[in-house]
Amino acid sequence: MEHKPDRDAIRLDAVSAGYGGTAVLHEVTATIPRAQVTAVIGPNGSGKSTLLGVLAGVLAPLCGELHRSISGRPAFVVQHTAVPATLPLTVRETVAMGRWGERGPWRRLTRADRDLVAACMARVDITDLAARRLDSLSGGQRQRTLLAQALAQESRLLLLDEPAAGLDADAQEAISRCLTEISADGVTVVQATHDPDEALRADHCLSLRAGRPVAQGTPEEVLAHRFRGRCE
C-alpha cells in the first residue's frame, strides 16, 4: 500500500507554554496544514510569538504535546526591525549566513552553496541588491533579504514573525506572493500577523486571544468569527 504523508504538518494537543514557569499560551489545540500558508492572528500579547517559539523548538511546552510530521530544523524569519541595519554586511553575505547551519560559520561555502544563495536571492527579487549593505536598504528590501536567508536553510517549515509589519502595500504584497509560491513548492509556512488583509491572503488561519485559541479554519471563517465576537 502506498504511504500517504500526513495532511497536517503539525498538531498541538492542549499545549501550554510561557516563560519562567508562567504560561502565556493556555491549552492550545490546533493543526497546521502541510504545504500551506497559515496565518496566526491576534492582538499584541495574544501569544503569537510564543506559539512561534514553540513551533521553532526554542521554547519547550509547559504541558501538552506537539506532534510534527516534517523533519529537519525550522527556519525562523524575524522582523526586519529586529536586525540592526548598521551591521557591516552585504545582502549576499546576509543570505549566505543561511548556510551556516549546514557548513558552520568558519568553513568556506561550496559551489553548490553559492549557487543556492544566488537562487534564493533571485527568488525574492534581490539579485541586483547583492553587493548593497543592509544599512542602504529599505525595510521591505531588508525583509526580503531575511526571507532569502531563511530559504537558504532549505527547511520544510518556515516561521515568520510579523513579516509585513511596517512595510508599504507593495512590499507587503511582494512578501505575501513569495510565501504563496514557497508553499506551492511543499514548504509549510506559518506567519504571525495582526493584519486582517495579510491573514486573508493565507490558506489557513488560527486566531488567538489572551493565549487561547478562539477559532481556526479558512481566513474568511476565522475573521468573520473574530469580528462577530467584537460586536456581541
Image (cartoon, rainbow, N blue to C red):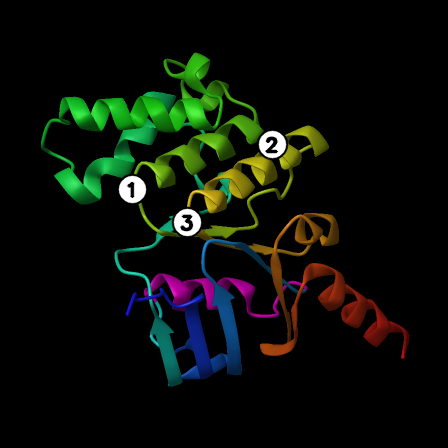
| Disc 3 and disc 2 in contact, CB within 8 angstroms | no
Disc 3 to disc 2, how far (Cα)? 18 Å
| Vertical relation: 43 (above or below) 165 | below
Mark sitting earlier along the chain (3/1):
1
User: Is 23 situated above or below 35?
Assistant: below
Q: Secondary structure at mark 3?
A: loop
Residue 84 screen position, x and y as percent: 43, 35
Residue hosting label 3: 187
Q: What whole-number distance in Å separates the C-alpha atoms at marks 2 and 1?
A: 21 Å
> Mark 1 = which residue?
153
**Mark 2, secondary structure of its residue:** helix
The C terminus is located in which quarter? bottom right
Q: Given the image, on which type of amino acid does mark 1 rest?
A: Gln
Residue at the spot 43% in from the left edge and 42% down from the top edge:
185
Amino acid found under the numbered disc labelled 2: Ala
Residue 92: percent from the left, percent from the top?
33, 22
Q: Is residue 89 visible?
A: no
Write the start and end of the magenta stretch as one range.
Answer: 43-58
Q: Position of residue 211 (x, y in %)?
A: 58, 77
Give, as a three-letter code, the residue at label 3. Val
The foreground one among 192 and 90 is: 192
Q: Quadrant of residue 227?
A: bottom right
Instruction: Name the residue at the front extreme.
Output: 1
Q: Residue at x 46, y 54 (%)?
A: 35
Q: Residues within 10 Å of mark 2 (few under 14, many from 20)?
A: some
